[in-house]
Image (cartoon, grey):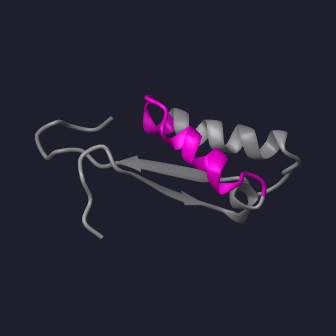
C-alpha cells in the first residue's frame, strides 16, 4: 500500500472494532488531532458503547520525512 502524507493507520483490538462501527471509526480518524488523541477517542467510544475489556488502539499518522512526528 502506498502511503501519502496525512494517511492514518489504525491497529486495534476487537475490544474496539467490535464496538465501534467502520463509519464512526472513519469519522474519528478524520479529525484534526494528534494520533494519541485519536486512539484515546476510539477507546473511549468503544467503552461507551458497552465494551468493558481489551479496548486497545494505536494510530499512526504518515508524514513527509522532513516534517517530524505528530
**The residue stretch that appears in magenta:** 19-36
Give me the residue at 13% from left, 46% from top. 65
Coordinates of residue 66 in the picture (x, y in percent): 11, 40
Q: Is residue 39 above or below residue 34?
A: below
Pick whichever, 26 or 10, lies toward us.
26
Give me the residue at 82% from left, 55% from top. 53
Pick whichever, 61 or 23, lies toward us.
23
Occupied quadrant, residue 44 = top right
Q: Is residue 13 magenta?
A: no
Give me the residue at 45% from left, 29% from top. 33
Occupied quadrant, residue 38 = top right
Residue, far front: 23
Quadrant for the C terminus, please. top left
Coordinates of residue 43 in the picture (x, y in percent): 68, 44
Pick whichever, 4 or 54, lies toward us.
4
Q: Is residue 32 magenta?
A: yes
Amino acid at each position: 500500500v502506498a502511503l501519502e502524507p496525512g494517511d492514518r493507520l489504525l491497529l486495534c483490538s476487537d475490544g474496539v472494532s467490535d464496538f465501534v462501527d467502520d463509519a464512526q471509526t472513519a469519522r474519528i480518524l478524520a479529525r484534526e488531532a494528534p494520533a494519541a488523541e485519536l486512539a484515546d477517542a476510539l477507546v473511549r467510544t468503544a467503552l461507551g458503547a458497552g465494551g468493558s475489556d481489551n479496548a486497545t488502539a494505536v494510530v499512526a499518522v504518515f508524514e513527509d520525512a522532513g516534517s517530524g512526528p505528530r
